[in-house]
Image (tube, rainbow, N blue to C red):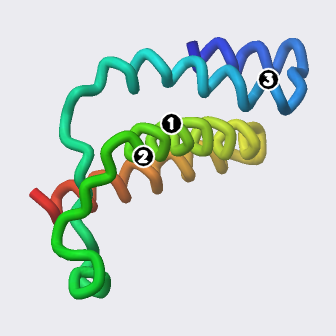
Amino acid sequence: MMVLLGFADDVLDLRWRYKMILPTVASLPLLAAYSGATAIMMPTLLKSTLGVVLELGFIYKIYMGALAVFCTNSINILAGLNGLEAGQAYIIAVSILTHNLLHF
């Protein structure tokens, strides 16, 4: 569905409000089906204040939905600027990979 958003934006020149609504709608089935952990491990600087693990519950799903909207829109904004969106997608992927490897 998100590939169609990029195509529709290029062909139809969509307004910004549709670029916010469509990623939100596209992420809802994934968030509704998610039944995994909703706890996050705190960075070293915050462990003394918030503890080692912080349980977010429903707030975790709201955060992940907002993250999906942010990532798709930030990449779409840079599309067509000499390959900057590919570099941004690479940086996001490497950041997620590094985070997962550090907390494995």
Label drawn at residue 59: 2
Residue for badge 1: 65
At which x and y percent is residue 94?
A: 36, 55
Q: Is residue 94 left or right of residue 63?
A: left
Report the front residue among 80 and 75: 75
Residue for badge 3: 18
Q: Mark 1–mark 2 contact, CB under 8 Å? A: no
Q: Residue at x 23, y 83 (%)?
A: 44
Tell me the crowding category of disc 1: few under 14, some 14 to 19, or many 20 or more residues within 10 angstroms, Cα based.
Answer: some
Report the front residue among 17 and 4: 17
Q: Is residue 24 above or below residue 83?
A: above
Q: Sequence order check: which comes first, mark 1 or mark 2?
A: 2
Q: Quadrant of residue 64?
A: top left
Q: Residue at x 15, y 62 (%)?
A: 103
In the picture, the quarter occupied by the C terminus is bottom left
Q: Is residue 69 left or right of residue 41?
A: right
